[in-house]
């Protein structure tokens, strides 16, 4: 990352706020800090697959939150590369992602797994909250109003403050929407794939809001999901004509099949256990959108050995592996 600056998510006071700030007068109530945050879906790692809306959000942000799971985190490196491609020089605030309990004893049952995830979400909310509290504002975000109502963003006001979009300014430049100009900055949180599919980001941000330490205004920008990319790579429709497709996790695959599902997209698997499904058809992909991308299609019994090899190779090449597959009876 050549130009993008990086800071850690430790709390810091605002050095630009004068000591005489009326909000800091002794005896006055402590105001709730305000922050703005955009959850930006970035697709599956290919910088070319960001939407124009996502690119604009990164370019207009004051800082980007990047979660880091370990010292050498290849997924964090992908996020930094995307920032460097589309918003060089954007300040990166790294947030150490709390560890999740992955022990077999804690996650052996659905209830146990859900409890572990709940604890992890709360720990993530606390970490993100501290990162936002420790990031000083700049007021230069995309929807800030300028001049006498002339905002620069897509919902910018025209004329004397008559904006047409949802965050349009009103009056003589006084923004009424969440991105109205004030002293705080706009952050972009880069979300893998699309935030709507098996991703905890929205739930964690809701927890940040519920904790009440920050007056947080936020929105969500969609990204290209692994489901879409899988279908595109294999040139397949995810469902038969007029029929449903069930999207589930590997943990609940057997439950879904036992309930009668016969056309499924499966995500979040540490491996493939397809016992009893040998005559089904599989469309499989790993690390979609990355240089280590791998694709396999065929009858499960024939494809499974090929998939196991391709999965191992993808992980060895990239340092990580995320796969998704369509199963059809």
Image (cartoon, rainbow, N blue to C red):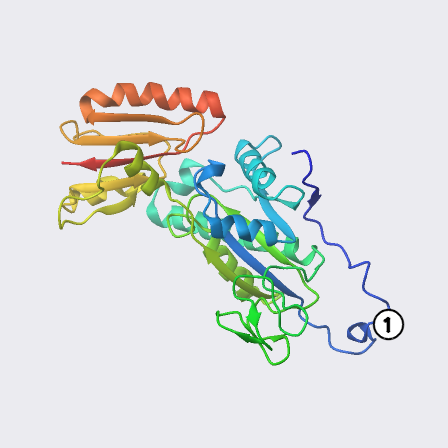
Residue at horizontal 66%, vertical 74%? 148
Q: From the viewer's perspective, is 220 left or right of 6? A: left
Indicate whether 39 appears above or below 217.
Answer: above
Indicate whether 251 appears above or below 211.
Answer: above
* Direction front: furthest residue: 159
The quadrant in which residue 143 appears is bottom right
Q: From the viewer's perspective, is 97 left or right of 110? A: right
- The percent position of residue 180, horizontal first and vertical second, equals 61, 69
Q: From the viewer's perspective, is 3 left or right of 106? A: right
- Give the SS element for disc 1: loop
Indicate whether 19 appears above or below 284.
Answer: below
- The percent position of residue 177, horizontal first and vertical second, equals 55, 71
Mark 1: few, some, or many residues within 10 Å (few <14, many ≥20)?
few
Q: From the viewer's perspective, is 241 left or right of 104? A: left
- The percent position of residue 144, horizontal first and vertical second, equals 62, 65
Residue at horizontal 67%, vertical 67%? 33
The quadrant in which residue 6 appears is top right
Q: Which residue is mark 1?
A: 20
- The percent position of residue 89, horizontal first and vertical second, equals 67, 43
């Amino acid at each position: 990352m050549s130009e993008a600056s990086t800071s850690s998510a430790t709390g810091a006071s605002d050095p630009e706020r004068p000591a005489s700030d009326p909000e800091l007068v002794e005896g006055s109530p402590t105001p709730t800090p305000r922050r703005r945050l955009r959850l930006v879906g970035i697709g599956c790692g290919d910088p070319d697959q960001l939407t124009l809306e996502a690119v604009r959000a990164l370019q207009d942000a004051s800082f980007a939150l990047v979660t880091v799971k370990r010292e050498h985190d290849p997924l964090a490196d992908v996020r930094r590369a995307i920032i460097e491609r589309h918003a060089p020089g954007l300040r990166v605030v790294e947030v150490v992602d709390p560890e999740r309990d992955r022990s077999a004893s804690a996650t052996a049952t659905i209830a146990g797994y859900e409890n572990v995830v709940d604890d992890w979400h709360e720990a993530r909310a606390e970490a993100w909250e501290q990162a936002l509290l420790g990031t000083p504002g700049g007021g230069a975000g995309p929807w800030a109003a300028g001049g006498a109502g002339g905002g620069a963003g897509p919902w910018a006001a025209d004329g004397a403050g008559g904006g047409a979009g949802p965050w349009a300014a009103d009056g003589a430049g006084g923004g009424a929407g969440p991105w109205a100009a004030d002293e705080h900055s706009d952050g972009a949180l880069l979300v893998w794939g699309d935030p709507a599919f098996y991703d905890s980001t929205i739930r964690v941000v809701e927890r940040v809001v519920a904790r009440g330490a920050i007056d947080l205004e936020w929105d969500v920008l969609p990204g290209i999901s692994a489901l879409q990319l899988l279908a595109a790579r294999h040139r397949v429709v995810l469902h038969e004509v007029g029929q449903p497709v069930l999207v589930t996790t590997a943990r609940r695959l057997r439950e879904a099949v036992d309930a009668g599902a016969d056309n499924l997209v499966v995500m979040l698997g540490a491996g493939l256990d397809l016992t009893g499904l040998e005559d089904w058809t599989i469309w499989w992909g790993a690390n979609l959108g990355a240089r280590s991308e791998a694709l396999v299609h065929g009858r499960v019994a024939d494809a499974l050995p090929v998939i196991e090899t391709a999965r191992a190779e993808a992980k060895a090449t990239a340092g990580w592996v995320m796969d998704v597959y369509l199963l059809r009876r």
